[in-house]
Image: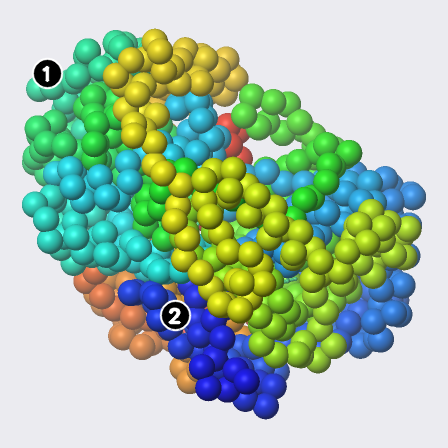
Amino acid sequence: MSGDRGQVTSAHWGASRVFTEGGRIVRAEPFEEDPDPSPIAHILPKAVHHADRVARPSVRKGWLKGDRARGSGHDDFVEMPWDEALDIAAEEIGRIRRVHGNEAIYGGSYGWSSAGRFHHAQSQLHRFLNCIGGYVARQGSYSLSAAEVMIPHIFGVSESEFHYSYQERWSEIVEHTETLVAFGGINTKNAQVNPGGTGAHRTGAYLRAFGAGRGVMFNVSPQRGDSPEFARWIPVIPGTDTALILALAHELERTGRVDRDFLSRCAVGYDRFRAYLAGETDGVAKNVAWASAISGVPAEEIVALADRMATTRTMVAVSWSVQRAENGEQPYWAAATLAAMLGQIGLPGGGFGEGYGTTDGGGTGPTRRWGGGALPQGTNPVGIAIPVARIADMLLNPGMPYQYNGQNRTYPDIRLIMWAGGNPYHHHQDLRRLERAWEKPDCVIVNEPWWTATARRADIVFPATTPYEREDFGRESTDPYIFHMPRLIEPLGEARDDFEIFRGLAARLGAEEAFTEGLSATEWIARLYGDFRAHSAGQGVATPALDDLKARNWAKIDPPPQPAEGPLAAFRRDPEAHPLQTPSGRIEVFSDTIAAMGYGHCPGHAVWIEPTEWLGTRDRYRLHMLSPQPADKLHSQLEAALADEPDARPMRVVLNPEEARSRGIADGTLVEVFNDRGTCLARARISDDVMPGVLILPTGAWYRPDGQGRDTQGNPNVLTRDIGTSPIAQGPTAHTTLVDLRPV
Ligand SMILES: Nc1nc2c(c(=O)[nH]1)N[C@H]1C(S)=C(S)[C@@H](COP(=O)(O)OP(=O)(O)OC[C@H]3O[C@@H](n4cnc5c(=O)[nH]c(N)nc54)[C@H](O)[C@@H]3O)O[C@H]1N2
Ligand SMILES: Nc1nc2c(c(=O)[nH]1)N[C@H]1C(S)=C(S)[C@@H](COP(=O)(O)OP(=O)(O)OC[C@H]3O[C@@H](n4cnc5c(=O)[nH]c(N)nc54)[C@H](O)[C@@H]3O)O[C@H]1N2
Ligand SMILES: [Mo]
């Protein structure tokens, strides 16, 4: 019946109309309501039916013989019937709980998995683990850990609340912003995706409207393509944004254009920051000449930009990428401080904003998010969480003390890893180090639809369905579209839903009733949808009944009414009546809380700290590698199908003609990108759109090392460094990486 019109389903890259024939997905077409559909969906039919799907439960042969040498990913697997594999897994989970306790289970399981509220793989895993006594969790994200820790210190509110409800909307930027300074750029490449989906992509239209208006956009980035063509490109040496921002601040001071009234009413600690800017604390004035030498931005350009920022309505926008680097806390703090000095925080189209264009949800939707509908995960009695990107440190160093946001902590001793809906051999840094760490636990259990590098490094692999093989509903908290996601095809091979896999394990561990509450998947979907409806109704949002939604496939609903005044506008108008939730009630240019942490690197206000790997060092690796998000897909998802396209792998690495010439590299040359941590193959693409000294190698390739440990696909994470941003946030630092390359 779906043969003629297909059926609409939702994905993180947007909705598609999917067509099936004879039990196979044959085509995915753009959702008719979407003005800017993402092309990512095109690869779907090939990926879903790809030979790299995990067909049956599989157990690593070496593990059955008692070895832990899973790290290399070269071991063979034996396929088993479901009952047998579930028995083996449940027995091992039970043994580890008995002998080592639940604090020996790592269930952080970071990853985007797929859209759909009920079958959210990570939530299913967390619920299962909580039903059997809990697990070691993770906090923060690979996306923006440093921002997640810093925004509450500076603005007294969670990063997500700031992102969705505090900073200016795109509509205000288009109408009011005269100068949009985008550190790390703002583009539609990344706004193709949105966690949970997006019915009609919104960012493109806003960017086009901004480009057509009188506002000027500055793309402060090592790559021209990080912003639309109409933006003025200011190439900046990677990792030096903080120095550049400090010089803009210094220039405001020098020319007497700091908004002292705003600072005294709405901020604390400016005097101490100003002493640092002037060089009173360290003998170095953070002036334009100083920053020009560090950032590579000509002094007159910094002067002109500061002048423009001081005399026009200015938005200081920072991408998430700039904080995915060593001391990634600092560019955010510096940018917020600069915005406070300009005194435009809380004015229409002015102030500080982060993550515009990083997803389609950033600044496009209503400031009030609505509805519920998430799978309840229960409570976790273990009560231990690690900063997400410290996983290898944890596995390698049980019992070792570490610092996090002012707390003294120790790493737990992990014996079991369970993962569902993520690919750490895509997302983690220094993969060869992860391989070594991965051999520490007694057992690794992974639920995956495809034989990813992570599945290949598991002891027990359970084949999971994709969203096309099960029913669900899809929604995102700012998106006016809701979707019934019908089951389009039967599960492939012997794949089961994560819910069914965990039900099977829970039954064997005496927790089936706690896990399912006696409900089937269909009944759970009805319950969660009911929860979503009730929450929406409570916020004045009318939604169709589930049967109605099923019949219609999708619906567009009216978001809740927007508040007349945003929280930052109210704060600015009357900071006494509407204080921020920081210790001072104001914007913290200086934070006593951070100063009291006593971390030597950070005195309590934004500072420039020279990175250990950057183009200013005399390192023997002379190129700075950036590994942004891939344009043609979401992370490593659907990679099985993309990797087979003729000439698609290894990935393209983009470099400036200057660097290519001096190394004898032509467009299309097969190259090795290398440093002390690893080597990967890539194919050179030469372009003036990348500044000299910088390499662009997007993420997304699966990790497939050859006999010498050289990755054959072009996965930048064999080269990236696995250290935390700083003891404040301990976030990932993929963008702080020096490499070199040579023709093969
Ligand atoms: N060098 C470098 N590394 C980075 C970044 C960078 O900028 N540079 N960016 C980082 C960022 S921001 C992020 S968010 C991470 C992303 O890292 P991940 O979120 O881990 O990447 P994905 O490829 O989305 O992984 C999702 C996995 O879940 C599987 N999956 C999908 N649906 C289901 C399901 O229903 N059930 C189960 N069991 N599995 C499912 C997919 O097949 C896929 O393997 O990468 C990080 N890594
Ligand atoms: N198509 C697609 N879109 C995605 C994703 C995807 O996988 N595919 N992933 C989504 C996810 S999980 C996230 S977290 C967001 C991430 O969103 P971001 O973190 O904002 O995006 P990136 O693509 O990592 O980086 C954007 C650009 O920042 C620039 N950059 C890197 N380092 C520096 C620096 O030191 N200074 C300056 N000024 N610029 C720098 C690089 O040139 C890079 O192209 O994207 C989301 N959007
Ligand atoms: Mo992310």
**Which of the 4 image quadrants contains residue 323?**
top left
Give the mark toward the camera: 1 or 2. 2
| Distance between the alpha carbons at the discs numbered 1 and 2 | 53 Å
Q: Image check: 52 left or right of 689?
A: right
**Which of the 4 image quadrants contains residue 473?**
bottom right
Q: Position of residue 661 (x, y in %)?
A: 23, 67
| Image quarter hosting the N terminus | bottom right
- Numbered disc 1: secondary structure: loop
- Numbered disc 2: secondary structure: loop
Front in this rendered view, residue 254 or 42: 42
Q: Which residue is mark 1?
A: 256
Q: Is residue 354 above or below residue 568?
A: below
Amino acid on which the number 2 mark rests in the picture: Phe
Q: Image check: 566 left or right of 433?
A: left
Amino acid on which the number 1 mark rests in the picture: Gly
Q: Image check: 361 left or right of 569?
A: right
Colouring mode (rainbow / by chain / secondary structure / one colour)? rainbow
Front in this rendered view, residue 89 or 21: 21
User: For the residue with label 2, is its CB less than 8 Å from the closest atom of ligand 2?
Assistant: no
Q: Is residue 276 above or below residue 484?
A: above
Q: Position of residue 348 (x, y in %)?
A: 21, 32
- Local packing at callout 2 (Cα closer than 10 Å; few below 14, some 14-19, many 20+) is many
Q: Which residue is mark 2?
A: 31
Q: Position of residue 452 (x, y in %)?
A: 61, 68
Residue at the farthest bottom position: 22
